[in-house]
Image (spheres, coloured by chain):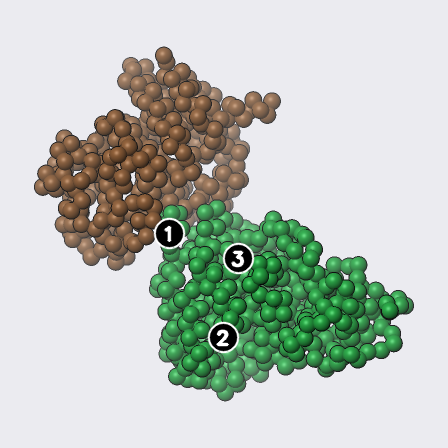
């Protein structure tokens, strides 16, 4: 069975035009993406890594915020599916002086884009855009709101390591309040039956998160022994300047994953980090490169997830154009 | 000026405790005493099935002129007021330049006279340039027609300046209106802080930012004997603070906006900037508390905070779009739907909050009433006409409303200002020669 044949089974579940976030997806839809990604992971192991699924399609990366890894991962995923790709990078601030981002997106659509991969510092921007353009939209990160493909690749990595998601205790560690990765992970993990623990200082994990069905803990050492997965979020240094924690050194003292803390946890604790990681702040180099770390698996799985998402959305474009004929 | 007979309507005048079906006569720009009249009228308005009430007064609108005429002008805003059944508006001073001098206040009055739409009353700035540092020339502003003072758009952040303003304004018995918010607690805020802002990853504005300022200003009014008016009250705790302040005899009043008693922060899930306002939409329990405050008259005013913004400014990323929505043309239908049709208030109770109460607050002696001799500002409302709100039909220059597409039942039908029919949806106004129905 070829990769694309296999993916077609999952594609039957998928009826959406866009991937805007994970909150609105069902467990079945999330599983469909993960299953599709598994078949594309196989493509990456071949000597010839390209399949013709998106031949003739144009995938535009529309990035209003700096990103190297996510953009590269989407570009490579599109190329492996034989799509043409083009990057458009602009700082949101320079755009605000003239053309609005909606105008920019319309221009890009007029160039023939089929799928827009958008990253923007403002929550909801992909949603707003989806009302103004006809192409399929993939949210590659909208402010602190959602980053669906990152959470999907985290889930894929967990599922590959443990064979399941349901019943696992997954801890998201760090700046939950400002993290789109945390939000997408919370929605997806809850839907697939994991127990989600949020850990960090109360300024970064404020009151209220319990209402999303999460356990909130401020002392890492207390919760570590119970965790199956530790997902270490990046800490942004400007949060310290805004007074949300006193110093990077104090943060590290309480929340950095060190060799000693790894010993507190289960022997098979799976360590994830969406990156880019700050070695010596969120985790020590020996932990980042140690046996519990799945950081590089995440990068490889990210490619498969993005291929899966592009593939599933392109199927909807096909259906749409047939309908128009 | 024509003699007008408004025939057979349900006359509701809370200033006299009046609610009865009857005829209302207008002559020479004045209301005739109830029961008075002539043999003939030059204009006859068939108001059967409709509500006839004092012209509505909206104490909180932004008309954007001078400075932002792309959003609204005094003429377009005053026309929108009429289409919404509002015969008088009090306009906020956050224009460019600010209404902080006598000349600036007089310019507003002049433009309103030229427009010949609704009456416009300027609210002067509390501080020079609305900078929050030094008192504006409040006495000269009064001479120029200012009916109250506020730095609205922004709060008076300094407790010391607020204290001085409350003291000094006693000289003119004018009220200080305050946009209550501790600025440093709302930096970067887009919406109410709570589970919805967490969900959406948008910057939060905590209810406490409002509560703290309301508590401070009530206390400052108490020690100075000044009059503090809480604009667009939006939180449960603030309503409780006003209720408690009134109980203690503090001269505190409060207004609520239709969006704060009909919408919540859950509406932001659409990321539609037409749900972005300041103060932000709060939670259902806040909405219930605001309605509770309206019911027990803790909140004596319904005002729109009409805040027009041109489409190109509002159709932006939500954190960059400006705060605020237009409200004049949805005041009556949304108030009716959220408060009257749902059984919280009666028509007379709601009309009081939009007519006689505002007139008393602003010292407009001949307005907000249908007493004999009062200014002939009259609003005729059709309370049972199913219609769909369509922003494209607004007379306001801006269309930024969250209520587009809402199915509603009440609507201003005909509006008289100073004894002139200045707005009508047609069909009920007959001119000279027509006979008076028996």
Q: N-terminal of the two: label 1 or label 3? A: 1
Quadrant placement of the C terminus of chain B: bottom right
**Where is residue A269, by image quadrant?**
top left
Q: Colour of chain A?
A: brown
Q: Image point 42% across, 77% down: which residue?
A: B245
Q: Which residue is drawn at 60% across and 62% down?
A: B340
Whether residue B192 can be seen here: yes
Q: Which chain carries label 3?
A: B
Label ID, residue B195 = 1
Q: Residue B141 carries which label?
A: none
* In the rendered image, residues at marks 2 and 1 fall on the same chain: yes
Secondary structure category for the residue under label 3: loop
Is residue A76 visible to us here?
Answer: no
Q: Pointer 1: residues within 10 angstroms few (<14), some, or many (20+)?
A: some
Which quadrant of the view contains residue B431?
A: bottom right
Instruction: Note the chain letter of the green one.
Output: B
Of marks 2 and 1, which one's residue comes earlier in the chain?
Answer: 1
Q: What numbered label is drawn on residue B253?
A: 2
The label shown at residue B262 is 3
Regarding mark 1 in the picture, which secondary structure is present there? helix
**In 3D space, how far apart are the residues under numbered discs 1 and 3 (Cα atoms)?**
19 Å
Q: Is residue B27 above or below residue A166?
A: below
- Residues under labels 3 and 2: Cα distance? 21 Å
């Amino acid at each position: 069975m070829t990769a694309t044949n296999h993916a077609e089974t999952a594609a039957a579940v998928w009826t959406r035009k866009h991937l805007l976030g994970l909150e609105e997806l069902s467990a079945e839809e999330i599983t469909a993406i993960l299953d599709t990604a598994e078949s594309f992971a196989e493509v990456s192991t071949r000597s010839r890594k390209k399949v013709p699924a998106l031949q003739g399609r144009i995938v535009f990366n529309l990035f209003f915020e700096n990103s190297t890894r996510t953009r590269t991962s989407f570009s490579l995923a599109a190329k492996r599916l034989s799509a043409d790709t083009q990057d458009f990078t602009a700082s949101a601030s320079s755009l605000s002086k003239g053309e609005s981002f909606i105008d920019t997106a319309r221009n890009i659509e007029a160039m023939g884009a089929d799928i827009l991969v958008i990253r923007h510092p403002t929550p909801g921007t992909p949603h707003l855009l989806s009302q103004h353009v006809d192409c399929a939209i993939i949210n590659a990160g909208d402010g602190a709101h959602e980053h669906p493909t990152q959470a999907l690749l985290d889930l894929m990595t967990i599922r590959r390591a443990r064979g399941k998601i349901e019943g696992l205790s997954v801890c998201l560690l760090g700046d939950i309040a400002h993290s789109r990765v945390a939000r997408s992970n919370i929605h997806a993990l809850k839907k697939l039956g994991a127990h989600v623990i949020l850990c960090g200082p109360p300024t970064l994990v404020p009151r209220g998160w319990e209402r999303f069905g999460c356990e909130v803990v401020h002392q890492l050492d207390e919760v570590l022994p119970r965790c199956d997965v530790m997902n270490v979020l990046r800490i942004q240094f400007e949060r310290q300047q805004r007074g949300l924690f006193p110093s990077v050194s104090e943060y590290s003292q309480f929340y950095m994953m060190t060799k000693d803390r790894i010993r507190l946890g289960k022997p098979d604790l799976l360590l994830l980090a969406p990156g880019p990681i700050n070695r010596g702040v969120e985790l020590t180099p020996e932990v980042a490169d140690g046996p519990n770390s799945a950081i590089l698996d995440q990068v490889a799985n990210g490619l498969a997830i993005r291929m899966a998402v592009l593939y599933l959305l392109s199927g909807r474009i096909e259906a749409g154009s047939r309908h128009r004929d | 000026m024509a003699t007008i007979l408004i025939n057979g309507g349900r006359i509701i005048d809370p200033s006299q405790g009046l609610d009865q079906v009857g005829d209302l006569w207008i002559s020479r720009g004045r209301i005739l005493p109830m029961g008075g009249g002539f043999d003939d009228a030059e204009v006859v308005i068939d108001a059967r099935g409709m509500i006839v009430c004092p012209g509505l007064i909206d104490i909180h609108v932004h008309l954007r002129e001078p400075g932002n005429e792309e959003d609204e002008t005094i003429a377009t805003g005053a026309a929108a007021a009429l289409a919404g059944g509002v015969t008088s508006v009090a306009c906020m001073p956050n224009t460019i330049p600010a209404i902080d001098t006598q000349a600036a206040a007089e310019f507003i009055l002049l433009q309103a006279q030229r427009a010949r739409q609704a009456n416009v009353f300027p609210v002067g700035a509390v501080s020079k340039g609305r900078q929050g540092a030094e008192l504006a020339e409040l006495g000269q502003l009064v001479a120029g027609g200012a009916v109250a003072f506020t730095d609205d758009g922004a709060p008076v952040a300094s407790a010391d300046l607020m204290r001085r303003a409350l003291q000094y304004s006693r000289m003119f018995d004018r009220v200080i209106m305050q946009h209550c918010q501790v600025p440093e607690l709302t930096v970067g805020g887009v919406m109410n802080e709570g589970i919805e802002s967490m969900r959406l990853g948008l910057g939060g504005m905590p209810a406490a930012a409002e509560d703290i300022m309301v508590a401070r200003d009530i206390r400052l009014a108490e020690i100075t004997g000044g009059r503090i008016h809480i604009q667009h009250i939006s939180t449960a705790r603030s309503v409780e603070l006003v209720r408690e302040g009134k109980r203690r005899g503090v001269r505190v009043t409060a207004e609520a906006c239709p969006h704060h008693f009909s919408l919540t922060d859950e509406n932001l899930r659409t990321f539609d900037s037409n749900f972005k306002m300041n103060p932000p939409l709060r939670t259902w329990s806040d909405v219930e508390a605001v309605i509770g405050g309206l019911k027990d008259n803790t909140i004596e005013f319904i005002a729109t905070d009409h805040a027009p913004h041109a489409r190109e400014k509002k159709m932006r990323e939500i954190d960059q779009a400006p705060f605020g929505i237009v409200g004049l043309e949805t005041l009556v239908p949304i108030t009716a739907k959220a408060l009257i049709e749902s059984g919280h208030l009666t028509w007379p109770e709601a009309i009081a909050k939009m007519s006689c109460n505002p007139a008393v607050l602003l010292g407009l002696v001949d307005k907000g009433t249908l007493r004999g001799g009062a200014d002939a500002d009259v609003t005729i409302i059709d309370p049972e006409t199913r219609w769909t709100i369509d922003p494209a039909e607004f007379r306001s220059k801006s269309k930024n409303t969250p209520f587009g597409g809402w199915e509603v039942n009440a609507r201003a039908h005909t509006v008289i200002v100073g004894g002139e029919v200045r707005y009508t949806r047609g069909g009920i106004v007959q001119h000279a020669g027509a006979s008076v129905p028996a």
